C-alpha cells in the first residue's frame, strides 16, 4: 500500500504522518458523539455549526485589519471556534422558540452572509502591495493532507478532552439521551446535558471542518452513529460499532485516496456511506 | 364561579404518605390550583381525575418537588418534596412516549439508569434484579427497548421508578393508548406491587374508567378540588361539574400563551 510506503519513507513521512495522526484523532473524536447525535436527532446542528465557520473567518479577517494578530492562522482558528460556539448556543436558544430546523436555517444563512460580506471588507481594506487574504472557501474545505504536526496535537487534545468528558458524565448523559423528562425526575439537569452535548459537538465539528472540510465533518458526525444504532443493542456496543465504522471509513478512504491520487475527504465519505449501507442491510431496523 | 364541593376532610392521621395543605399555584395570571387540601394515606392508591389543564400534572409536580406552591405546603413521607426525592423515596413514571426507543439499551439497562447515577454497576445489580422480579420482567429483561411491547416498556419504567426503594410512586397518564386487556394487566401489576411492597401510589388520568375501577380513593381536580373520597362519590353531577362546567372556562382563561387575549379581543 502506498500509504504505508509513504509513512515508512523518511522523505514523505513529514506529509503523511500528521495526516494519518489527524485522521486517527477524528476516529476518536467523533464516534461516541455520533451515537448521541443519532439518538437525539441533532445531525443538522453540526451542519449549522460548521457553516458558522464562514462567519468566524469573516470576523477574524476584518478585525485583523485593526488587530493583525487575529488574521494569523491561530488567530483565525480562535475566532472561528468562538463564533461557532456562539452559533451553537444561538441555535440551541432559538430552537426552544421556533423549532430546531428553523433555528439552524437562520443561523446558517446569517453566518454565511456575514462571513462573505466581512471577507469582502477585509479584502478591500488590505493595503496595496500586501497579499490579499486567502480565499474564504479554502478555510472551510480543509485537506487532511495539508495538516501540520501542531494540527495533529490539537486534534488529539480535543479527542481526549471530548472522550473524557463523555466518560465522566456517561450515566447522566445516557439517561438524558434515553428519556429527558424521566431523567429530570431523577435529578438530572436536562439543560446542562443539552448544553454539554452542544458544546462538544461544536468543538468536534469546528476541528474536523478545519482539518477535513465541512462535508467530512457532517458525514463523520452522522454516519457512524446512525450505523451503530442498527448494529448494537446496548450503549457500549453502539460506541464500539460507531468507532469501527469511523475507523474503516477514515483509514479506508485515506488508503484509497493515496493509492489512486484522489481527494481524501470525498473518498472517506463514500467508504462511510458504504459501511452505512452494509449496516442497514445486515443490522436490525432502527 | 365554583360551587365548591369540597369533600376533603382535613388531613388527619400521622401516617399519611403525602399531605397537601391549602396549596395554590399559578402560572402568570392563570391559576392552576387554588386552595387544595388533601392527604394520601400510606399504602393507598389515589386516583387524580380531571380535564386537561385542570391542574393534575401541576399537583404531581408539586409533590415531586419540581414546583413550589405559592401558598400552603406539601409534605412527602414526613419531609419536603425535594428531600424525599433526593432520598430516593419517590418514583416517577411519566408518559411512556417520552423515551427514545432507538436508544441502544435492554430493559434491564433502562431499569438501572437512575441507580447508576449514584453508584457503581456492581453495587446496583441486586437492586436491579429485585425490581425486575417485582414487575415480572424477567422474561424480557434482556430484550432491547425497541423490541418491547407498550405494556412491557411500561413495566420496565415502573421498575425503574421503584428500583431505588421508592415508597411513593407517581404515575402520570399511565394508560393512555392502552387497550382494555392491557389496562387490566396494568391494574394487576399495581395490585401485586402494592401487596408486595406497600408502596403508596398516586395515579393521574383523564380516563375515568382507569381510575374509578381501581383506586381506593379519588381526587377530582379542576383548579379546585371537587371531590376527594370513595369512587362511589363520582356521580354524574360531580363529573358534569368537573369536566363540562370548566371546559367552557378553559377557552377564556385556561389556555396558556395568549388564549385569554384572543378571547377578550374576539368580536362576539
Image: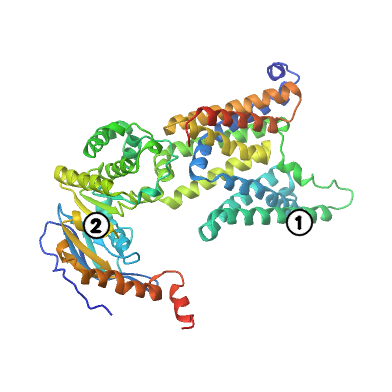
State the residue position of label 1: A117
Q: CA distance from mark 1 to mark 2?
A: 64 Å
Q: Position of residue B212 (x, y in %)?
A: 20, 58
Question: Under tag 1, what secondary structure?
Answer: helix
Depth check: give the residue in front, A198 or B231.
Answer: B231
- Disc 2 packing (10 Å; few <14; some 14–19; many ≥20): few
What residue is drawn where x is 82% and y is 52%?
A123
Which residue position is annotated with label 2? Answer: B209
Please state the horizontal and vertical placement of residue B15, each as a whole percent of the image.
Answer: 12, 56
Name the one closer to the observer, A236 or A28. A236
Query: Is residue B77 visible to us here?
Result: no
Would residue B107 be found to the left or right of residue A142 on screen? Answer: left
Front position among marks 1 and 2: 2
> Left or right of B180: which side holds A204?
right
**Both labels 1 and 2 in a single chain:** no
Q: How many C-alpha atoms fall within 10 Å of the one at disc 1: few (<14), some, or many (≥20)?
A: some
Q: Please give left or right for residue A238 compared with residue A203 in the image.
A: left
- Mark 2 lies on a secondary structure that is helix
Amino acid at each position: 500500500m502506498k500509504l504505508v510506503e509513504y509513512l515508512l519513507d523518511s522523505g514523505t513521512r513529514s506529509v503523511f504522518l500528521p495526516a494519518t495522526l489527524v485522521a486517527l484523532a477524528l476516529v476518536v473524536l467523533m464516534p461516541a458523539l455520533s451515537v448521541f447525535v443519532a439518538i437525539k436527532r441533532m445531525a443538522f446542528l453540526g451542519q449549522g455549526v460548521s457553516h458558522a465557520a464562514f462567519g468566524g473567518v469573516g470576523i477574524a479577517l476584518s478585525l485583523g485589519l485593526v488587530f493583525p494578530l487575529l488574521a494569523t492562522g491561530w488567530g483565525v482558528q480562535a475566532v472561528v471556534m468562538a463564533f461557532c460556539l456562539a452559533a451553537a448556543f444561538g441555535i440551541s436558544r432559538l430552537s426552544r422558540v421556533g423549532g430546531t430546523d428553523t433555528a439552524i436555517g437562520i443561523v446558517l444563512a446569517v453566518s454565511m452572509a456575514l462571513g462573505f460580506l466581512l471577507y469582502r471588507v477585509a479584502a478591500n481594506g488590505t493595503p496595496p502591495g500586501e497579499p490579499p487574504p486567502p480565499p474564504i472557501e479554502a478555510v472551510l474545505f480543509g485537506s487532511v493532507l495539508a495538516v501540520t504536526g501542531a494540527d495533529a496535537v490539537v486534534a488529539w487534545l480535543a479527542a481526549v478532552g471530548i472522550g473524557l468528558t463523555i466518560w465522566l458524565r456517561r450515566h447522566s448523559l445516557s439517561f438524558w439521551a434515553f428519556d429527558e423528562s424521566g431523567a429530570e425526575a431523577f435529578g438530572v439537569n436536562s439543560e446542562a446535558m443539552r448544553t454539554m452535548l452542544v458544546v462538544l459537538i461544536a468543538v468536534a465539528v469546528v476541528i474536523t471542518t478545519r482539518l477535513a472540510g465541512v462535508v467530512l465533518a457532517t458525514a463523520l458526525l452522522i454516519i457512524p452513529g446512525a450505523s451503530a444504532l442498527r448494529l448494537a443493542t446496548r450503549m457500549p456496543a453502539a460506541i464500539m460499532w460507531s468507532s469501527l465504522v469511523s475507523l474503516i471509513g477514515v483509514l479506508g478512504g485515506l488508503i484509497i485516496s493515496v493509492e489512486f491520487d484522489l481527494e481524501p475527504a470525498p473518498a472517506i465519505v463514500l467508504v462511510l456511506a458504504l459501511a452505512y449501507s452494509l449496516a442497514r442491510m445486515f443490522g436490525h431496523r432502527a | 364561579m365554583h360551587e365548591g364541593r369540597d369533600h376533603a376532610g382535613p388531613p388527619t392521621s400521622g401516617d399519611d404518605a403525602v399531605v397537601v395543605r391549602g396549596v395554590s399555584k399559578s402560572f402568570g395570571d392563570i391559576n392552576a390550583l387554588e386552595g387544595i387540601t388533601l392527604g394520601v394515606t400510606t399504602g393507598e392508591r389515589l386516583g387524580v381525575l380531571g380535564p386537561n389543564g385542570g391542574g393534575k400534572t401541576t399537583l404531581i409536580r408539586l409533590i415531586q418537588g419540581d414546583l413550589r406552591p405559592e401558598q400552603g405546603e406539601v409534605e412527602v413521607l414526613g419531609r419536603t418534596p425535594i428531600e424525599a426525592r433526593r432520598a430516593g423515596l419517590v418514583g416517577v413514571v411519566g408518559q411512556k412516549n417520552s423515551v427514545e426507543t432507538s436508544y441502544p439499551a435492554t430493559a434491564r439497562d433502562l431499569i438501572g439508569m437512575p441507580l447508576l447515577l449514584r453508584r457503581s454497576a456492581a453495587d446496583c445489580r441486586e437492586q436491579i434484579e429485585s425490581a425486575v422480579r417485582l414487575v415480572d420482567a424477567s422474561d424480557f429483561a434482556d430484550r432491547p427497548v425497541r423490541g418491547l411491547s407498550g405494556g412491557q416498556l411500561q413495566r420496565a419504567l415502573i421498575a425503574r421508578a421503584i428500583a431505588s426503594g421508592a415508597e411513593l410512586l407517581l404515575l402520570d397518564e399511565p394508560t393512555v393508548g392502552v387497550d382494555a386487556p392491557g389496562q387490566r394487566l396494568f391494574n394487576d401489576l399495581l395490585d401485586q406491587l402494592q401487596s408486595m411492597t406497600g408502596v403508596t401510589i398516586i395515579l393521574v388520568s383523564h380516563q375515568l374508567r382507569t381510575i374509578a375501577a381501581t383506586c381506593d380513593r379519588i381526587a377530582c381536580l379542576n383548579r379546585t378540588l371537587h371531590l376527594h373520597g370513595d369512587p362511589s362519590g363520582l356521580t354524574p353531577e360531580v363529573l358534569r361539574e368537573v369536566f363540562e362546567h370548566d371546559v367552557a372556562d378553559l377557552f377564556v382563561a385556561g389556555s396558556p400563551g395568549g388564549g385569554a387575549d384572543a378571547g377578550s379581543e374576539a368580536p362576539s
